Image: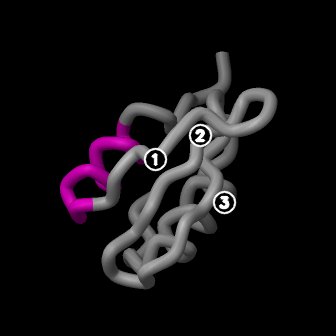
């Protein structure tokens, strides 16, 4: 089974005061980062550490995976 980065990623986002905005289209959630003052999509079921790190970068956070 491939590792899932969903929960650790969401924990890091919450720890950085990022907030869940709404459910997006399909299997995505829309989150907001106070660091970058931008919204970004977070897919449900993140199998790749590269995807997880790219989402952190969009949120203005350092790589963690």
- The residue under label 3 is 50
**Prevalent SS, magenta region:** helix
In this view, the mark in front (2 or 3): 2
Name the residue: 66% across, 15% down. Answer: 1
Q: Mark 1 touching mark 2, by CB under 8 A?
A: yes
Image-based side of 25 in relation to 53, left or right = right
Q: Position of residue 41 (x, y in %)?
A: 64, 53
Return the residue at label 1. Answer: 21
Q: Earlier in the sequence, mark 1 or mark 3?
A: 1
Question: Residue at position x 38%, y 75% from top?
Answer: 61
> Which residue is identified by label 2?
29
**Mark in the foreground, 1 or 2:** 1
Q: Farthest top residue?
A: 1
Give the alpha-carbon distance from disc 2 to disc 3, as whole Å.
18 Å
Q: Is residue 27 above or below residue 37?
A: above
> Toward the viewer: 18 or 11?
18
> Quick check: 9 left or right of 42?
left
Badge 3: residue crowd in 10 Å (few <14, some 14–19, many ≥20) = few
Q: Residue at x 22, y 61 (%)?
A: 17
Return the disc, 2 or 3, that comes first in the chain's sequence. Answer: 2
State the SS at label 3.
helix
Is residue 46 visible from the viewing direction of this image? no
Mark 1 is surrounded, within 10 Å at the Cα level, by few (under 14), some (14 to 19) or many (20 or more) other residues, namely few
For the residues marked 1 and 3, what is the alpha-carbon distance in whole angstroms? 23 Å
Which residues are drawn in magenta?
8-17
Foreground residue among 65 and 14: 14
Q: Residue at x 67, y 55 (%)?
A: 51
Distance, label 1 to label 2, CA atoms, is 8 Å
Assess whether residue 58 is covered by the magenta stretch. Answer: no
In the rendered view, would you say 60 is above or below 59? below
């Amino acid at each position: 089974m491939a590792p899932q980065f969903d929960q650790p990623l969401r924990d890091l986002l919450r720890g950085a005061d990022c907030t869940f905005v709404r459910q997006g289209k399909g299997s995505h959630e829309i989150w907001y980062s106070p660091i970058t003052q931008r919204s970004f999509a977070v897919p449900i079921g993140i199998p790749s550490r590269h995807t997880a790190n790219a989402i952190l970068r969009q949120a203005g956070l350092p790589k963690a995976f």
